[in-house]
Each structure stands twice: as structure tokens, then as C-alpha cells.
Image: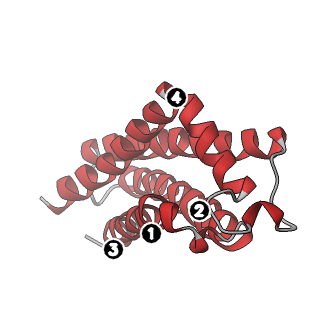
Amino acid sequence: MLKRVKSIMVLTVALWGFIGAIHNLVDWNGTIAAVTAVTSMVTIDGGPDGWQATSNLFVIWAGALFILLSKILAGILCSVGGVKMWHANVSDNAYHKARNIALAGCGVALIMLFAGFIVVAESWFELWRSESMLGPVLQSAFRYGGMIGIIALFVATND
């Protein structure tokens, strides 16, 4: 039973990644606009005058692609790992290999959320100062990271 629960939990992380990637793709202009708002620091008083503020298209596209591709990769790894975990016997080596794939997917999601949103957006581009982006962006990233981290810890425990 626990194996099934862990598989489903990992598959929900995959679903999160795929749904997020679809939204980013369907509203690509919105994705680019959000990354531009962060990098140009326009949502912060005096932000555009900051030394780190940039509207460089390479930086903006790199950020948007990092988010999109990380969600897709996390979704793929968690899908493969979750399905293989479902079908493997807990005592088999195949289950542990599948679990490692699933945990790698969770890790990719956590790297994207922490590195992209906390380190780069919040720390480098001082997004913590933005009233309009604090809740919808940073608090969401923290919430997603927390849930994915808890899932990863639970999945990593011995059955």
C-alpha cells in the first residue's frame, strides 16, 4: 500500500510539472513578461535604476526557458519513476532504481524553484521588495518547493 501512495505522490509532482509547463507555453508572452518584470525590477520602487536590473533578451529568455524546461524534465523523470515504482516489487532493485529516477525529478523541480525563484529572482533581483510579486510568485514557489520536498523525503524513506 505504501508503495502505491509513494508512486501517486511522485506522479502528482509530474502532473504539477506538466501543467505548469503547459501554462507557460500556452501563455508564452505572459511567461516572458513575468520574467522581464523580475529582471528589469519594474515592480520595485527604484528597481529599474538598480545596478543588477536588466532587460537583456538573452537573460530573459534563458530564465523563461530554465523554468519551462525544468518543469518538463521534472515531469518526465517523475512520470517515469512513478510508473516504474508502481510496477516494481518494493524488495527489487528495480524499485530502488525507479525511486531514484523519481527523486531526481523532485530534485530538478526543487533546483528550479530554489535557484530560479529564491536565489535569482528573490535575492539577485530583490523580488522580496515587490508587493505585487511577493505572494503570487515567491510564496507560491516556496509552497511548491515545500510540498515537493516533503514528498521527496517521504518517497526516499524505506518502506
Instruction: Kindly tell me whether residue 124 is visible in this rendering.
Output: yes
Please tell me in which quadrant of the rendered image residue 60 appears.
Answer: top right
What's the CA distance linking mark 4 and mark 2? 18 Å
What's the CA distance linking mark 3 and mark 1? 23 Å
What's the CA distance linking mark 3 and mark 2? 27 Å
In the rendered structure, which amino acid carries the disc numbered 2?
Phe
On the image, the x and y values in percent for residue 81 come to: 40, 46
Residue at 47% in and 25% down: 26
N-terminal-most mark, 4 or 2: 4
N-terminal-most mark, 1 or 4: 4
Residue at 64% in and 66% down: 44
Check the image and name the residue furthest to the right. 51
Residue at 66% in and 55% down: 38
Per the image, the residue denoted by label 2 is 117
Per the image, the residue denoted by label 3 is 157
Kindly state the secondary structure of the residue where label 4 is placed.
Answer: helix
Kindly state the secondary structure of the residue where label 1 is placed.
Answer: helix
Describe residue 29's horizontal placement relative to residue 137 as left or right: right
**Is there a contact, CB below 8 Å, between mark 1 and mark 2?**
yes
Residue at 34% in and 71% down: 150
On the image, the x and y values in percent for residue 136 come to: 42, 58
Per the image, the residue denoted by label 1 is 142
